[in-house]
Image (tube, grey):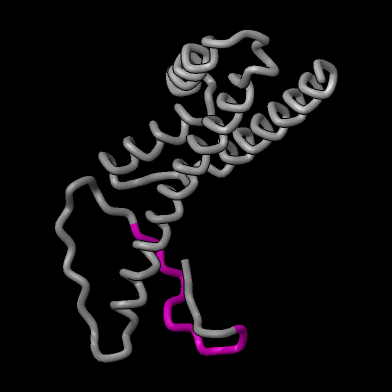
Amino acid sequence: MGHRYGLRGRWVLRGVDLALPALALVRVEGGNGAGKSTLLRLLAGIAALAGLLAALCCVLLGAAVGALSTRPVLGRRGWSVAAAVLGSVLALVTTGSAARYAVTALVTGSRTGTFQPPVLPSLGAAATAAAAAFLVCRIAARRG
């Protein structure tokens, strides 16, 4: 990991590799301008990115479930809420679900102190939401 201010600015941090055990207490020392605050800001930003991507997975899959639970798709009244609840539960508990993977990675990362930002699950959730939107539009157009 490294950081510099601007495209041509001097490197404030360069080649930083940090591995900490879970629940470790760490003291960061250094003189003025050594990069202590920058390091902490970078670490906070990486953790925030992981949380943001996990939330994005859940939102995108929720949008897909909501779209597939509309009346034009189901064709009957009164089924939308039941279908949305069932779809939401399945999106979180089904093996291979992007939402489940993202949330599990976030929880595991908070316990172990290491995490992988769920980039692939986010892309999978975006593809699922796009496919659901396309399908709903096609069904709604046919039913009028």
Answer above or below: position of 2 versus 135.
below
The spot of residue 28 in percent (x, y) is: 21, 72
* Corner quadrant of residue 125: top right
User: Residue 59: percent from the left, percent from the top?
Assistant: 51, 38
Residue 94 visible at all: no
21 part of magenta stretch: no
Q: For this view, does 56 lie left or right of residue 51?
A: right
- Determine the image quadrant of residue 44: bottom left
Viewer-nearest residue: 38 or 81: 81
Using the image, determine if residue 77 lies above or below residue 23.
above
Picture coordinates of residue 33, whole percent (x, y): 32, 89
Q: In the image, which residues are magenta?
A: 7-18
In this view, the residue farthest toward the right is 142
Left or right of 98 on screen, residue 75: right
Query: Left or right of 144: which side holds 59?
Result: left
Nearer-the-camera pick, 61 or 143: 143
| Image position, residue 88 (x, y; %) | 47, 22
Identify which residue is drawn at 45% across, 42% down.
Answer: 55
- Magenta stretch: includes residue 11: yes
**In front here: 115 or 68?**
68
Residue at (66% x, 29% y) in the render: 128
Examine the rendered structure and indicate whether residue 46 appears above or below residue 131.
below
Q: Which residue is painted at 82% across and 20% down in the image?
A: 144
131 vs 25, left or right, is right
Residue plotted at (40% across, 36% down): 105
